[in-house]
Image (cartoon, rainbow, N blue to C red):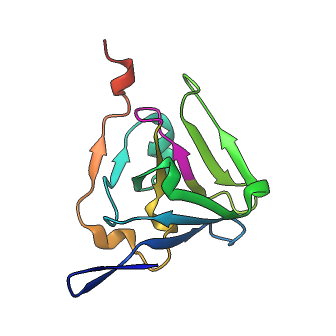
Amino acid sequence: MIKQVGSTPILLKHKATCHCGTVELELTLPNGIEKPRRCDCSFCRRRGAIAASVTLDNLKIVKGHEALRLYQFNTGTAKHYFCSICGIYTHHQRRSDPSEYGYNVGCLEGVNPFDLGDIETSDGVNHPADRK
């Protein structure tokens, strides 16, 4: 689906896949890639992905739902999903904002995350939900 803004067409629907293609997501990104970031928590440091955010209703699992596996740790609030075939992290329901999914920017078709330039690193070691 393409939205017209003035004379500029903007792609609203984006396809994201795991490495083997078993899992396919459809993302609605009316404003493009929003809030791209890395996180320095123990899990994200190891994963190394750049994540961006989308509201829950703007991410749809098109295929491969049965291949997705869930990983939760620490408080168990965030729900991290990955393909059980190739192991690629595709998305997660955020701990700091459960009304959003974080998705792996590297899974977006036609997007090279290395072209995004400098990416902010979130302080996941001192997560906002842990601060009093």
At a point 52% along the width and 67% down the height, the residue shown is 107
Q: Position of residue 24 (x, y in %)?
A: 64, 67
- Most frequent secondary structure within the magenta stretch: loop
**Quadrant assignment, res 30:** bottom left
Specify the farthest residue to the top.
Answer: 132
Magenta-span inclusion, residue 94: yes
Q: Is residue 87 left or right of residue 100?
A: right
Q: Position of residue 42 (x, y in %)?
A: 47, 35
Q: Is residue 80 left or right of residue 87?
A: left
At a point 54% along the width and 22% down the height, the residue shown is 75
Q: Position of residue 2 (x, y in %)?
A: 40, 80
Q: Nearer the viewer, residue 42 or 90?
A: 90
Magenta-span inclusion, residue 68: no
**Quadrant assignment, res 112:** bottom left
Q: Is residue 90 left or right of residue 131?
A: right
Q: Position of residue 126 (x, y in %)?
A: 34, 25
Does the image show residue 126?
A: no
Q: Where's the C terminus, which quadrant? A: top left
At a point 67% along the width and 57% down the height, the residue shown is 87
At a point 33% along the width and 55% down the height, the residue shown is 36
Does the image show residue 21?
A: yes
Q: Bounds of the magenta span?
A: 91-98
74 is higher (above) or lower (below) than 59: above
69 is higher (above) or lower (below) than 107: above
Q: How many marks?
A: 0
Specify the farthest residue to the bottom.
Answer: 7
Specify the farthest residue to the right.
Answer: 66
**Quadrant assignment, res 97:** top left
Q: Nearer the viewer, residue 75 or 24?
A: 24
123 is higher (above) or lower (below) than 100: above
